[in-house]
Image (cartoon, rainbow, N blue to C red):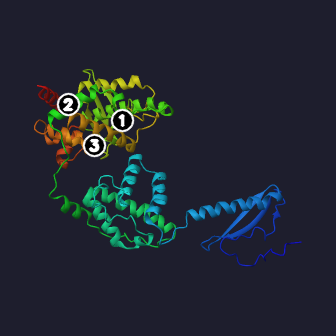
């Protein structure tokens, strides 16, 4: 006889209740499996219907109750309301969508980077008292995303502080990975960005009109000092000190990481490669050693930031020998300078920047080069471009660095001829040491 507390199957379920104890199981005559069709009402009021199956009738209700706990847990994780904190939603939902999206790894890293700018998590400005990202989406609610001015001020501020490219990427991320996910969660029923012109190009142009164009470049003497210092630097001097016994197992990894960042920096300093291009190089696809000992690098469209293939060379023979030596030292590595932890994997950009920061600060302090206190991997492109400006035509330099001077000039440039850069770099080295 049913308990007197058992409610009728037709009674409306209250939030959090289920009908597991009200319904009757049945057995399929062919498969002999037992089934239980039940429903539950989520705390939000939404009715959810489920069906549980088992080979034993006695297990049905227990399995169904376990499912209830799972559904409730998932529901609690997705209980987003218009008043919910927008930053929490972005970090919980949008970030996950980017990480699992079918995108190139470099694109994912770029999108995750601008996601931090969108919520004002900017290391470049976080120590400033006036908090330059005052119009970020931090401290906003989900409902604020319906206000186009909120989005516009955020994008224009990113354009002002980080340039139009970052703002355009932020625009894509907000539309595709924030607003679109909100529409899936029924938090917003339209895309307020559709058809809007945020004038990002105009904002970036006006703000940057009076700023110094180009990157920060080192002098020829400081450049030579850095390269000489790095060639002699013992990785043990850069690796963190592990005094506690329980951390001693990390020492081999620390030394490999230190050696890798030294070699990566030397590679960038003598080629002008972007960091994502440098740590994407693989053996032997991108490396060619000519009969005269020069090391040539094929930057194909897949790893080029601009998706335009080009050919560069390592401008210092000492660095060329050092890079070639890595092949024998780390024979299992697929990449020229791969992950210090896993030989077959690429070194992620985030990890590179973290380790590079310590190296550049060390260089700044030891060599008394103020620029390296704040400048990072991009400084080598600006340095080489500046130091070789009077010796190499703008067409040859634009081809080398993957820039576009003018379409007609780029169209008639031989991207495989690196002889002019090699000769100029030799004169540069000799001039710096004389």
Mark-to-mark CA distance, 1 and 2: 26 Å
Residue 365 percent across, percent down from the top left? 24, 37
Q: Is residue 64 above or below residue 342?
A: below
Q: Is residue 303 visible?
A: no
Residue in the picture at 38% in, 56% down: 116
Q: Is residue 201 visible?
A: yes
Mark 1, residues whose alpha carbon is within 10 Å: few (<14), some, or many (≥20)? many
Residue in the picture at 63% in, 70% down: 42
Residue 16 percent across, percent down from the top left? 66, 70
Q: Earlier in the sequence, mark 3 or mark 2?
A: 2
Residue in the picture at 46% in, 52% down: 99
User: On the image, numbered disc 1 is attached to which residue?
Assistant: 281
Where, quadrant-wise, is the C terminus in this rendering? top left
Residue furthest out toward the right = 1
Residue furthest out toward the front = 244
Q: Is residue 14 above or below residue 108?
A: below
Q: Secondary structure at mark 2?
A: helix
Q: Secondary structure at mark 3?
A: loop
Image label count: 3
116 on left or right of 12: left
140 on left or right of 26: left
User: On the image, numbered disc 3 is attached to which residue?
Assistant: 376
- Image quarter of residue 139: bottom left
Picture disc at residue 225: 2
Mark 2, residues whose alpha carbon is within 10 Å: few (<14), some, or many (≥20)? some
Q: Earlier in the sequence, mark 1 or mark 3?
A: 1
Residue in the picture at 15% in, 33% down: 221
Mark-to-mark CA distance, 1 and 3: 20 Å
Q: Earlier in the sequence, mark 1 or mark 2?
A: 2
Residue 100 percent across, percent down from the top left? 49, 52
Residue 164 percent across, percent down from the top left? 27, 58
């Amino acid at each position: 006889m049913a308990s007197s507390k058992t409610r009728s199957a037709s009674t409306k379920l209250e939030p959090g209740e289920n009908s597991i104890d009200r319904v009757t199981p049945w057995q399929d005559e062919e498969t002999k499996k037992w089934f239980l069709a039940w429903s539950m009402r989520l705390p939000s009021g939404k009715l959810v219907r489920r069906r549980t199956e088992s080979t034993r009738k006695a297990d049905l209700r227990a399995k169904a109750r376990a499912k209830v706990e799972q559904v409730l847990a998932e529901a609690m994780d997705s209980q987003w309301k218009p008043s919910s904190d927008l930053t929490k939603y972005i970090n919980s939902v949008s970030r996950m969508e980017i990480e699992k999206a079918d995108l190139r790894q470099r694109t994912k890293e770029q999108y995750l980077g601008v996601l931090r700018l969108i919520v004002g998590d900017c290391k470049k400005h976080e120590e400033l008292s006036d908090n330059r990202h005052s119009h970020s989406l931090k401290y906003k609610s989900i409902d604020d995303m319906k206000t186009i001015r909120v989005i516009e001020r955020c994008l224009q501020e990113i354009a002002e502080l980080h340039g139009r490219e970052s703002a355009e990427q932020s625009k894509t991320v907000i539309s595709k990975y924030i607003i679109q996910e909100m529409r899936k969660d029924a938090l917003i029923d339209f895309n307020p960005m559709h058809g809007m012109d945020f004038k990002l190009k105009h904002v970036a142009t006006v703000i940057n009109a009076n700023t110094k164009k180009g990157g920060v470049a080192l002098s020829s003497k400081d450049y030579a000092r850095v390269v000489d210092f790095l060639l002699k630097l013992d990785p043990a001097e850069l690796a963190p000190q592990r005094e506690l016994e329980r951390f001693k197992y990390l020492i081999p990894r620390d030394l490999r990481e230190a050696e890798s960042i030294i070699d990566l920096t030397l590679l960038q300093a003598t080629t002008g490669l972007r960091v994502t291009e440098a740590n994407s190089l693989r053996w032997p696809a991108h490396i060619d050693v000519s009969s005269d000992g020069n090391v040539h690098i094929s930057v194909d469209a897949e790893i080029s930031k601009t998706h335009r293939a080009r050919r560069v060379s390592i401008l210092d023979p000492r660095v060329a020998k050092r890079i070639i030596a890595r092949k024998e030292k780390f024979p299992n590595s697929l990449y020229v300078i791969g992950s210090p932890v896993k030989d077959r994997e690429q070194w992620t950009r985030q990890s590179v920047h973290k380790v590079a920061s310590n190296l550049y600060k060390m260089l700044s302090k030891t060599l008394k080069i103020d620029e390296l206190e704040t400048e990072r991997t991009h400084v080598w492109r600006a340095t080489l471009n500046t130091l070789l400006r009077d010796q190499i035509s703008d067409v040859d330099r634009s081809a080398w660095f993957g820039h576009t001077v003018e379409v007609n000039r780029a169209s008639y440039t031989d991207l495989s001829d690196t002889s002019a850069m090699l000769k100029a770099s030799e004169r540069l080295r000799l001039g710096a040491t004389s």
